[in-house]
Image (spheres, grey):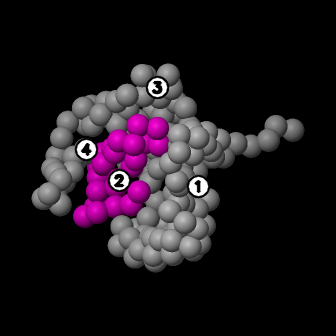
Amino acid sequence: MDENARRELEEKLQAEWGKLSEEFHMDDPVWEPLQEALPYKWCGGFMYMGRVDGIHLYKHGFTRHYLNLDGEGNAYRYLPGSDRYVPMNRFEAIENAFEGLALMGIDRSAPYDDAARRRRHKAMADSGMSLISIGPRGTTPRRSRRRRPRKQTRKRK
């Protein structure tokens, strides 16, 4: 893909990002269901992808699997082709979200942070893939508000 075609595609995707961001409430993350379902140290690997019909969509950065939870902590799986989410066992949903992580040699508590994204993008680029980054208001996703907030700690005197 030449540079002009790439820029044109990026502009079209950026416009679509704005529509999707509004439709799925992507810029209004809700972390409580995830933090109540998992040990806090495991939450850093997830991104908030939005919500649909009261179901919060959390995507694991390394496995790319979703953990879908409602406000009460009930788990759901998406049924492709039906555009529906159906209840499922929460333990199975959590295990599905982490599936493949051990094969990558990554611990469940490893954060999907800027350094991890840079390593992933570099590996993809080194393999010959072309990357396009989009995000809210012209930023890339790694700079968006979709990341889990860090725990606040007080400095010792």
Q: Give yes or no for residue 58 being in the magenta stretch.
A: yes
Relative to the observer, which residue lies in front, 108 or 54?
A: 108
- Reading the image, the residue beneath label 1 is 142
Does label 4 or label 1 sit earlier along the sequence?
4
Q: Nearer the viewer, mark 1 or mark 2?
A: 1
- Reading the image, the residue beneath label 3 is 104
Query: Label 4's element?
Result: strand
Does label 4 or label 3 sit earlier along the sequence?
4
Residue 138 drawn at (x, y percent): 59, 72
Q: Residue furthest right?
A: 157
**Distance of mark 4 from mark 2, alpha carbons?**
10 Å
What is the magenta range?
A: 49-73
- Asked if the residue under mark 3 is in contact with the one under mark 4, i.e. CB atoms within 8 Å, the reply is no
Query: Label 1's element?
Result: helix
Relative to the observer, which residue lies in front, 75 or 15?
A: 15
Would residue 56 appear left or right of 141 to someone viewing this image? left
Residue 43 drawn at (x, y percent): 48, 40
Residue 73 drawn at (x, y percent): 30, 45
Q: Nearer the viewer, mark 2 or mark 3?
A: 3
Question: What is the crowding at mark 4: few (fewer than 14 residues within 10 Å), some, or many (at least 20)?
Answer: many
Residue at 52% of width from left, 30% of height from top? 109
Does label 1 or label 2 sit earlier along the sequence?
2
- Mark sitting on residue 75: 4
Residue at 74% of width from left, 43% of height from top? 154
Does label 3 or label 1 sit earlier along the sequence?
3
